[in-house]
Image (cartoon, helix red, strand yellow):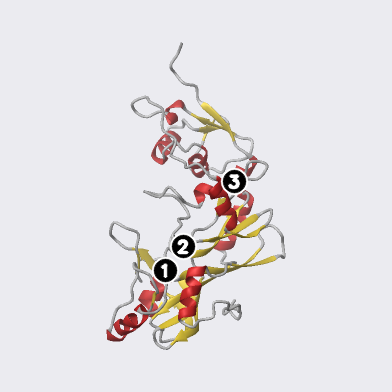
């Protein structure tokens, strides 16, 4: 009997129509590493309907993708291991369902809690992306993420129920058709109570992900902000609208441009003068929770499928942040859109 394995043929599902081949491979063949996939594509060993293809080829429903046996074997000839995937428990299912704040046949909106990662990574096994099967429909289609939130940021996270919806929402984000309103508490209070921050952001050097203002090489980053309430010079309740979506954009702009870091942010701190040190000491004795005070509070956007239908989704402040808002005398039930006059 021959030990040579046959190639594997995978038929593209309707829900995967239009995806890039390299992204589809990462999802459909998890044991195939990115580096090996690129190598096999260059050599023409991964084919679609018998033809050579490139990593950015858009796949179509019904096509047959040929995956060679070498994709499933290590150099020592042993089978590749499928990445570890935690089992979803009944407790996980109940938890995920409890996060839903809006749902229809096209999208789901979750109110993501603090300290929960959106996607996996090194030493991160428990995350939102790993539990999306909870929302699988009758056809077996699992919703997909269309944007991300930092692990330490709570609030609205959108899911698309199909590839078509994901593409439509992606276009909305690119065209800046989505108004994203974040709530934050910063300290001290900024000198100017409203305005537009325009400061390019670039990833800084070092062993961990941190961003910095870089006027020469940074990517354009624009943030609108309005101070809603302030507690003397100690702290301010601010609404932010990041018109662009750079990593840690609000946190960097607050600390490095406004000079008032988001409360609880240990990664980005504003420059400390004598007044800010005194203010920080005053806040220590208050009933303020120890966490990042940044919350994705509201999304206003056109429905990705239903033409002419606008969505206005609100994620109430979590209980721990309500505690801080109350301690500082801020209105945690504030309902206005502070950016209503802006285009």
Q: Earlier in the sequence, mark 2 or mark 3?
A: 2
Which mark is drawn over residue 113?
none
Residue at point 38%, 82% (across, down): 188
| Observer-nearest of 20 and 137 | 137
Q: What is the CA distance from the residue labelled 2 to the residue labelled 3?
A: 24 Å
Label 1 secondary element: loop
Which mark is drawn over residue 142?
3
Are dots 2 and 3 in contact, CB under 8 Å? no
For mark 2, does the 10 Å Cα neighbourhood hold few (<14), some (14 to 19), or many (20 or more) residues?
many
Q: Earlier in the sequence, mark 1 or mark 3?
A: 3
Q: On the rendered structure, is 140 left or right of 146?
A: right
Q: What is the CA distance from the residue labelled 1 to the residue labelled 3?
A: 31 Å
Q: On the rendered structure, is 208 left or right of 38?
A: left
The residue carrying mark 1 is 292
For mark 1, does the 10 Å Cα neighbourhood hold few (<14), some (14 to 19), or many (20 or more) residues?
many
Residue 252 place in picture, x, y as percent: 39, 70
Are dots 2 and 1 in contact, CB under 8 Å? yes
Q: Earlier in the sequence, mark 2 or mark 1?
A: 2
Which quadrant does the C terminus fall into?
bottom right
Which mark is drawn over residue 114?
2
Label 3 secondary element: loop
The quadrant holding residue 15 is: top right
The quadrant holding residue 36 is: top left
| Observer-nearest of 9 and 147 | 147
């Amino acid at each position: 009997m021959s030990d040579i394995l046959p190639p594997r043929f995978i038929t593209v599902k309707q829900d995967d129509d239009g995806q890039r081949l390299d992204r589809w491979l990462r999802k459909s063949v998890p044991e195939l590493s990115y580096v090996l996939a690129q190598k096999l594509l260059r050599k023409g060993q991964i084919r679609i309907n018998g033809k050579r293809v490139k990593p950015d080829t858009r796949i179509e429903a019904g096509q047959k993708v040929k995956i060679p046996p070498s994709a499933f074997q290590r150099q020592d000839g042993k089978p590749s291991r499928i990445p570890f995937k935690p089992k979803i428990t009944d407790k996980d299912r109940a938890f995920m369902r409890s996060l839903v704040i809006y749902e229809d046949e096209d999208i789901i909106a979750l109110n993501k809690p603090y300290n929960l990662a959106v996607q996996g990574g090194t030493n991160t096994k428990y995350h939102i992306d790993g539990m999306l099967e909870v929302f699988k429909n009758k056809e077996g289609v699992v919703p997909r993420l269309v944007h991300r939130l930092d692990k330490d940021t709570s609030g609205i996270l959108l899911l698309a129920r199909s590839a078509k919806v994901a593409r439509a929402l992606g276009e909305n984000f690119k065209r800046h058709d989505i108004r994203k309103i974040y709530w934050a508490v910063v300290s001290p209070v900024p000198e100017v109570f409203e305005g537009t921050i325009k400061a390019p952001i670039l990833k800084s050097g070092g062993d961990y992900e941190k961003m910095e203002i870089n006027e020469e090489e940074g990517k354009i980053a624009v943030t609108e902000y309005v101070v809603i309430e302030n507690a003397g010079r100690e702290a301010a309740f601010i609404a932010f609208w990041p018109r662009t979506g750079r990593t840690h954009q609000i946190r960097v702009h607050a600390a490095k441009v406004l000079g008032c870091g988001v409360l609880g942010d240990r990664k980005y701190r504003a420059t400390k003068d004598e007044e800010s040190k005194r203010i920080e000491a005053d806040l220590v004795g208050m009933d303020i929770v120890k966490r990042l005070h940044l919350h994705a509070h509201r999304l206003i956007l056109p429905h990705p499928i239903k033409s002419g239908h606008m969505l206005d989704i609100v994620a109430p402040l979590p209980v721990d942040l309500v505690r801080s808002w109350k301690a500082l005398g801020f209105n945690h039930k504030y309902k206005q859109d502070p950016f209503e006059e802006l285009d």
